[in-house]
Structure formats: C-alpha cells, structure tokens
Amino acid sequence: MCMKMIDLKDRKILFELDQNCRQSLSQIGKEVGLAKSIVAYRIKRLTSMGIIKNYYTVVDLYKLGFIAPRFHFVYQYVTPEVQKEIVDYFINSKYTFIVVSTYGPFDLSVLLGIRDIRKMYQIWQDIQNKFGYYLERQSLAFYINEIHLSPIYLLGEQKRKDMERHVKSVDGNQEIIELDEIELKILNEISGNAQVPLTSLAQQLKLSSRQIGYRIKKMIESGVIESFRTEIDISKLGYQSYKVYIYLREFRHRHQIVNYLITHPNLVCIDTTTGESHLELEFHLQNVDSLHRILQDVSEKFPNAIRNYQYCSVKQVHKWVYLPQVLRTV
C-alpha cells in the first residue's frame, strides 16, 4: 500500500536522509530538487506512514576500546512467554546494542559491546543458567569490520547509473580514542536520536551550540562517529532484508566476490567476522528469488568458489543502537 503512495522524490529524500540525517532541509531540497517547505512536508508524511522510523548514529565501538561479539541462538521447547522472556533479557542487558529475531537457520541474533573478553564468559554463563534449556543451538562470532553501502536501489534507474557507489566503513582498528565526559554525554544523546538539535544539546549540557558542534565534528574526524543514518521500514517499500552467510572453498575468493558485488544496488552491508562464515552480505530485495539469482550469478562468475551458504531474513528488530548502555552516561 505504502509503496504505491510514494514517488521518486520521496525515495530520493529517504536516500539523502540515510546518507546524513543531520543535514538541513535546504541541503536535502537542493539534492532532490524541492523547496525546503516541501521537503519538510514529505518527511513528516513519510514518518506518519511509518516508513521513517527513527534516526540513529553509527558508532565505531572498537575506537572506544570495545569488542563486538555476536550470538546466534536456535530455540527449543519455547512458549511465546518464554520467547518474550529471552528477548526481554537481551533488550534490557546493558551490554547489548542490537537484538533481532529472524526467519532462517537461527531464531535470534544478539550483538554485544564489551571491553574485556573475560566478561564474555560471565555473560555466556548467565545465559546458560537462565535459558540454556531453551537453546537447541548457539554460536559465537566476533565482528571485525562493517562496511555500509548506500541504498541506491531507492533511486531512479538513470540516477542510479550516474552515481558512484558510496561506501562508509566502521574499521574496527586498534586505535583507541579517549572521550571526555562531555563527549560521552553527547554521544549518548545522539546515539538513539541522531537529529537532536545542537541548541537542545547545548541547553541540556550547559554549553554553547558552537562547543557542541565542535565536539561532534571532532568525533566524526576521529572516526568514533561513522555516520548519521535513518531507520527505514523497507517492508513498506516492498523490500525485505536478507543476510547471507557464505562459506568458501578457498578464502582467497572472498576479496574477488566482494569486488564483484560491491556495485550491486541492493547490497547494503558487508560484514567481516571471525568464528562463523567467511563472508556476510546484507541485501534489500523484493523477494527471496532475487537473492537466489544473485548467488547463482556469483557461482557462475566464480565456479567452485562457494562451498555452501545460508540466509536469514528479519522478523523483528527489538533493539538497534550503536552504543551499549554500559558506556552511557546520565
């Protein structure tokens, strides 16, 4: 229904908001070819339709001294009540920043931010004590690198052809950035609402807007802040998110496959992890047949490169904020 009610201008606005949701309405209007007032009206309409859900800040946790382990869980013997208890446990954990229920080879995906690997054992032990009976399988991997790709599938065909692929990377390198108390408070405020005005932050933190802007710019330049993005309900646009886990016969094929697929308009994320698959790709597609066609194309381009693959789709996003509560300040 929503898909028929929006036009190319709306899609371009969504694209611009996902590039940088803190840019001004005038800047968006210049890119889209609309007056500032019309852009404001369309954004309000897209929000009321539920297409725009939230604005969030992508933070490189590695630069803050964190590591990012990820659990995949498969349920057994669960009732709806038990399933809710498990999900609520992870939503309320001060160490989690992403909690997603999925359709596919596992039921729940959980990402955590921790500073000490020994803490991981304590968390794992608590999970086993509380819910081990209800977990038929569980696996653990560690996020190393995350590359976000612009959702150029939102744009018109000609615009898509003329546009260079925008790539933004959360490096996960070993350079640790020390933030002061004010910077942590700013990061806390904008992590779950990336559009908080500088004036509001300044009033709350008793600083000038100029000081707040300077500190945000400083965190962007240091790589702590990777981007200001928009949470879009792509299902209302006729798309579904598919995460593909590829197992290769030889690891050297990974780089070749990434280079081949990076220009695909529906590829939105490339993850590097240790502990599970060799390559993780996220696509926004209209149906699973499109995914199979992509993988078939890769198999034909690189014969015998792929040993196996599995995929999942998003059932429900329960928590998505790139800043664990354990780091937050009041």
Image: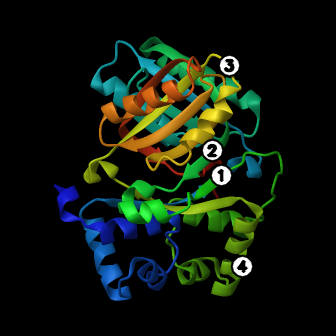
In the rendered structure, are the residues bearing label 1 and label 2 in contact, judged by CB atoms less than 8 Å apart? yes
Judge depth for marks 1 and 4 and give the one in front: 1
The residue identified by callout 3 is 250
Task: Tell me the kind of residue under disc 4.
Answer: Tyr
Q: Which mark is residue 217?
A: none
The percent position of residue 146, horizontal first and vertical second, equals 63, 44
Q: Quadrant of residue 43?
A: bottom left
Q: Which mark is residue 169?
A: 1
219 sits left or right of 320 in the view: right
On screen, residue 167 above or below 313: below
In this rendering, does residue 142 appear at all? no
Q: Residue at x 42, y 20 (%)?
A: 105
Closer to the chain start, of discs 1 and 4, is 1
- Using the image as rendered, state which of residue 177 and residue 36 is in the foreground: 36
The percent position of residue 127, horizontal first and vertical second, equals 55, 23
Closer to the chain start, of discs 3 and 2, is 2
- Label 3: which secondary element: loop
Judge depth for marks 3 and 2 and give the one in front: 3
Q: Residue at x 65, y 52 (%)?
A: 169
On screen, residue 28 above or below 268: below
Q: Residue at x 16, y 55 (%)?
A: 1
Q: For mark 2, does the 10 Å Cα neighbourhood hold few (<14), some (14 to 19), or many (20 or more) residues? A: some
On screen, residue 243 above or below 205: above
- Label 1: which secondary element: strand
In this rendering, does residue 52 appear at all? yes
Closer to the chain start, of discs 1 and 2, is 2
The residue identified by callout 4 is 214
